[in-house]
Amino acid sequence: MHHQWLLLAACFWVIFMFMVASKFITLTFKDLDGYSTKQEFLFLTTMPEAGKMPEEKLPEDVKVDVPHETLPLDQPLMYLERLELIRNVCRDEALRNLSHTTVSKFVLDRIFVCDKHKILFCQTPKVGNTQWKKVLIVLNGAFPSIEEIPESVVHDHEKNGLPRLSSFSRAGVQKRLKTYFKFFIVRDPFERLISAFKDKFVHNPRFEPWYRHEIAPGIIRKYRRNRTETRGIQFEDFVRYLGDPNHRWLDLQFGDHIIHWVTYVELCAPCEIKYSVIGHHETLEEDAPYILREAGIDHLVSYPTIPPGITVYNRTKVEHYFLGISKRDIRRLYARFEGDFKLFGYQKPDFLLN
């Protein structure tokens, strides 16, 4: 009889512990990083079985739910602090409209894929992206070395062997966002705008005539203050266009050419996609080798030599370009790019605003 009671008590104990554990698992699953059970289950059930699902292209209006990830803990302090800053700014409700975006086809078009080494690179134009694309082209096997890649091929997406993330199925996109090494590079937002203006409107390459013949006249018609002024597009016109809260109607006419001056938020969705490393143009000499090591490819390829002084922030140049532009227009420009300044730790340019 005594043994029967002991056996019965043991059974009750096992059942009780199972109920407690089940409740704990359910709560953990639901509360992990703020994701609901429904969202997690949706992601898990959309993962493809090997060989079962063809990689069909996503429709134009796609919006992808991105699986959440925790921060890596074995990175050097500088890189951890950059990721932690992004997390903190992303939580700031006052900045929500400036820091969050939808992971749409526009974003997925900006992200280049190296399946062989499980790498995703988000393109942020005017921040040395051509060199990173060359690195990925070599890794994907299209050319044996960076030196052998013709300049005309780098941005030719029919020939460079660089697939975009948008070319995969929804499940393929989610799998890669969940498991691949992900990175992009930023620089001071106003310096980047100056670089974009100089490259597209001043030194306008022959193979990109639309900047000078279509985009510049469109900006001048809408934003030139002095209607009798007949010179080509000026930096002041560009600033007024970018700072206009209603700039989007013109952006739509310009199409994807605007990627050279839209925000990092709009390009790469840093609050929605949890990147492995954020590189800074100003510290590229350190960041480039670090990114190659973290991605596990430093023994296969090197980042091209960086000319001395090219990555240093140039306050004098920034002051020169903004000279004579009204405080109102500069403040409106800053209001649009405030999310980029805060997410990536760039100092507010008070010397221009006050």
Image (spheres, grey):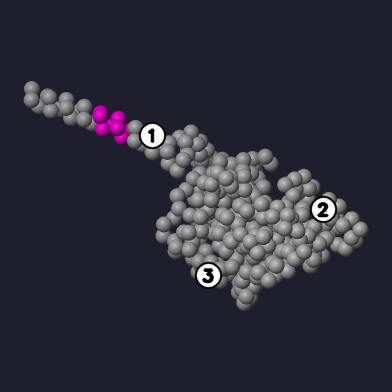
Which stretch did the figure color magenta?
Answer: 15-22
Residue 30, horizontal then vertical, whole percent: 43, 36
How far apart are the alpha carbons under marks 3 and 2?
41 Å
The answer to whether one can see residue 158 in this image is no
Residue 198, horizontal then vertical, whole percent: 75, 65
Q: Residue at x 55, y 59 (%)?
A: 345
How far apart are the alpha carbons under marks 1 and 2?
56 Å
Residue ID for mark 2: 223
Toward the viewer: 353 or 255? 353
Among numbered discs 1 and 2, the one appearing first in the sequence: 1
Question: Furthest-left residue in view?
Answer: 2
Give the amino acid at mark 3. Answer: Glu
The answer to whether one can see residue 35 in this image is yes
Q: Is residue 300 above or below residue 223?
A: below
Q: Residue at x 34, y 32 (%)?
A: 23
**On the image, which quarter does residue 261 sit in?**
bottom right
Q: Is residue 31 above or below residue 209?
A: above
Among numbered discs 3 and 2, the one appearing first in the sequence: 2
At label 1, counting other C-alpha atoms closer than 10 Å, the crowd grade (few under 14, some 14-19, many 20 or more) is few
Residue ID for mark 3: 286
At label 2, counting other C-alpha atoms closer than 10 Å, the crowd grade (few under 14, some 14-19, many 20 or more) is some
Give the amino acid at mark 2. Answer: Tyr
Under tag 2, what secondary structure? helix
Q: Residue at x 63, y 53 (%)?
A: 338
- Asked if the residue at tag 2 contacts the one at tag 3, i.e. Cβ–Cβ closer than 8 Å, the answer is no
Residue ID for mark 1: 26
| Residue 17 falls inside the magenta stretch | yes
Toward the viewer: 345 or 119? 345
Residue 39, horizontal then vertical, whole percent: 50, 36
Number of the label disc, if any, that sits on residue 56? none
